[in-house]
Amino acid sequence: MPCRRGNVLRTFRSRQSPFVSRNIYVLALESSADDTCAAVVSSNRKILSNVVAHQFQDQEKWGGIHPMISTECHQKRMPGTVRMALEESGMDMDSIDGIAFTRGPGMVSCLNVGANAAKTLAAALNKPIVGVHHMQAHALTPFLTSENPPQFPFLALLASGGHTMLLLATSPVSFKMLANTADVSIGNAFDRVSRELKIPWGEASGSARIGAGPMLEKIAAKHPTSNPYSFPELPLAMQGSLGFSFGGLVSSVQRLITKLGPAATEDSATQAAIAHAFQHAAVGQLQEKLMLALRSCERRGIAVKTVVASGGVASNMYLRSCVESTMKTLGIAVQYPPISLCTDNAAMIAWASMDRFLRGDVDPYDITVKPKWDLGELHAPPE
Ligand code: KG4
Ligand code: ZN
């Protein structure tokens, strides 16, 4: 089918003439992993709605994200989630100026649910679309939520279920990778250790559940920080080099659990001590790499004043206090999105698309998803 990008773009540009200054409203869809999300956000930083349908109940028996279950859940829930986001925002599609969706990275079948919904809706209603990089959206969330947004250049520490990255951000579309994980992500490590320790998923308000990572944090908090462990400290991986690795840490925890026997999972004090030791080693690795990255920037004459920590694991309060205290000694500010916007959500996708909608730099309707997408490959705005 021929793409009518030209027409759509013209319509949008004329609506967005610099002489007619008004806010624009974006409906965004996110489905890259296990949360089905839709949100309406305006160009003056108002989140009019932000709906997240979790899949905890559906995924719990698998102990992780199962792509087929996740895809099916997205397929079932995306229409209702979009409907709810519109209702909560008090808007209808006539007042929506553009539709954004997560283009990647993520699980292909999951990404396609949000992408196809967004593209079809946009084509039927003659609205422009923008496909967004999920990790760029995590990194830019403080520009939506903070009264005092970070100044470029800043370091972005993105810690989620799929990624652990330290990036130098020099503009909203320019990210240089300073450290990446050699194996699994920190979120995946939290989830696996939580499972190994047989920590049950928790109850939240209503029928909501608390997943493996946040539950490990809860259990670890029961270990008094002043108490020594009855076992050797877990090692910090890849010391002195700018790269992450969490696979070895997970294996060390597995060996420790085997050595300690049933007490590791059945004695609550031992379980809490192991959870704490793991969290301490995982977060310690983040702290060390942050220091290394800051030193490397300093050597290259790059004046970094802020660290932005985002992604699901950045909602961990132990991580926040450790990173903050390390950065305080160096006079570096740390910014996080509010907890509800650290984990996956569509408000961040809407915000990351906003500049492109405002510039009229929109995507064609035949755009495809990018399950693997290097953050260094974001396209620069046209001159
Ligand atoms: O960013 P996110 O919501 O989804 C991805 O893009 O992957 O991150 C989800 C990950 C999961 O591994 C989850 O267990 C972890 O973030 N997570 C946490 C916490 N909250 C979420 N890990 C440790 N402590 C938390 N409080
Ligand atoms: Zn994420």
Image: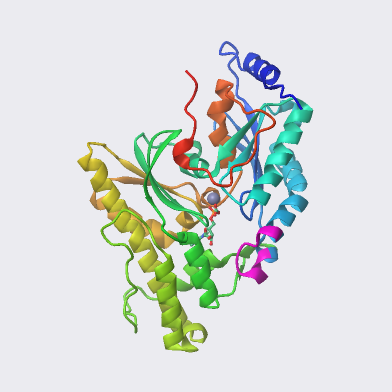
Q: Position of residue 349 (x, y in %)?
A: 58, 40
Q: Main secondary structure of the magenta part?
A: helix
Q: Position of residue 205 (x, y in %)?
A: 65, 62
Q: Quadrant of residue 101?
A: top right
Question: What span is colored magenta in the figure?
Answer: 59-68
Q: Quadrant of residue 181?
A: bottom left
Q: Position of residue 227 (x, y in %)?
A: 33, 79
Q: Residue at x 48, y 57 (%)?
A: 313
Residue farthest toward the front in the current orientation of the protein: 1
Q: Quick one: 166 or 206, which is closer to the camera?
A: 166
Taking the magenta stretch, the answer to whether it contains residue 35 is no
Question: Is residue 306 positioned above or below 229 on the image?
Answer: above
Residue 184 seen by the camera: yes
Task: Locate residue 340 relative to residue 9 in the image: left or right.
Answer: left
Residue 92 seen by the camera: no
Taking the magenta stretch, the answer to whether it contains residue 62 is yes
Question: Is residue 32 positioned above or below 65 on the image?
Answer: above
Question: Is residue 191 positioned above or below 4 on the image?
Answer: below
